[in-house]
Amino acid sequence: TGQRLEVDASPYSYAFDPHHTALLVIDMQRDFLEPGGFGATLGNDVGLLQRVVPPLRDTLHATRAAGLTVVHTREGHLPDLSDCPPAKRRRGAPTLRIGDDGPLGRVLIRGEYGHGIIDDLAPLPTETVIDKPGKGAFYATALDTVLREAAITHLIVTGVTTEVCVHTTVREANDRGYDCLVLTDCVGSYLPDLHRYALDMISAQGGIFGWVAPSQNYLKALQ
Ligand code: C5J
């Protein structure tokens, strides 16, 4: 029995069946949101991402209450760095490189404190957590299989950062046939201009990668 909910979105209304829709929470890890982590080593003001947390927390709670599937992702690497391309580790002039010891533990390494999801958005034991070595959540992960086995066709996309891991993942999802709605206040970037352009790129050309809407519009549809 199909259910059809509609979100007031751009470039036009986003329709979804909650039984075939998952909330995707991308990389809400200490390494990106707290001082001393990976994001900070690249010279970013991590405070800019904090504004995402309150609306995303409300969205996560409402989504759980409505019974939708929730999937979290974490960017990071194995302790021996065997899944980290040397090019990724060499890139730029960070104060600490991936795998180096920092204030939050080894930078962007699975199992370290900094690699963990922030307490406010901690996954429930029943929720899937996808560990990914790349920016896209589909590359070298079981995400597509997990979603297909759960008969998920629609993704509500949240997390950080808008123009990097969120964008790469939306593009990957779009090519695999998923309909993505990105919640504008539940994604964030260290670079506000790129955040805005990244959202425009998704909904331009009739929704070439998907839809965008503020979380309020999605929450209204869930009620
Ligand atoms: C970045 C991410 N920005 N999660 N990772 O390096 O967007």
Image (tube, grey):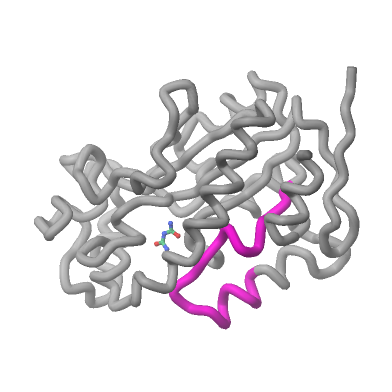
Question: Where does the N terminus fall, quadrant-wise?
Answer: top right
Residue located farthest toward the bottom when viewing the structure as drawn = 193
The image shows residue 75, relative to residue 122, as above or below, that is below
Within the image, what quadrant is residue 90 found in? bottom left
**Residue at image point 54% right, 33% down:** 143
**Residue at image point 43% right, 73% down:** 48
**Residue at image point 65% right, 77% down:** 197
Position of residue 153 measured from the top left corner of the image (x, y, whole percent): 75, 33
Q: Which residues are magenta?
A: 180-198
Relative to residue 33, is residue 146 drawn left or right? right
Position of residue 56 measured from the top left corner of the image (x, y, whole percent): 55, 52
Position of residue 127 measured from the top left corner of the image (x, y, whole percent): 49, 27
Question: Where does the C terminus fall, quadrant-wise?
Answer: top right
Q: Quick check: is 184 in the magenta stretch?
A: yes
The image shows residue 24, relative to residue 182, as above or below, that is above
Residue nearest the observer in this picture, 90 or 114: 114
Position of residue 158 measured from the top left corner of the image (x, y, whole percent): 58, 52
Residue located farthest toward the left when viewing the structure as drawn = 101
Q: Quick check: is 155 in the magenta stretch?
A: no
**Residue at image point 24% right, 66% down:** 35
Quarter of the rendered structure image containing ligand 1: bottom left
Relative to residue 202, is residue 99 drawn left or right? left
Residue nearest the observer in this picture, 106 or 187: 187
Residue nearest the observer in this picture, 220 or 196: 220
Query: How many tags in the picture?
Result: 0
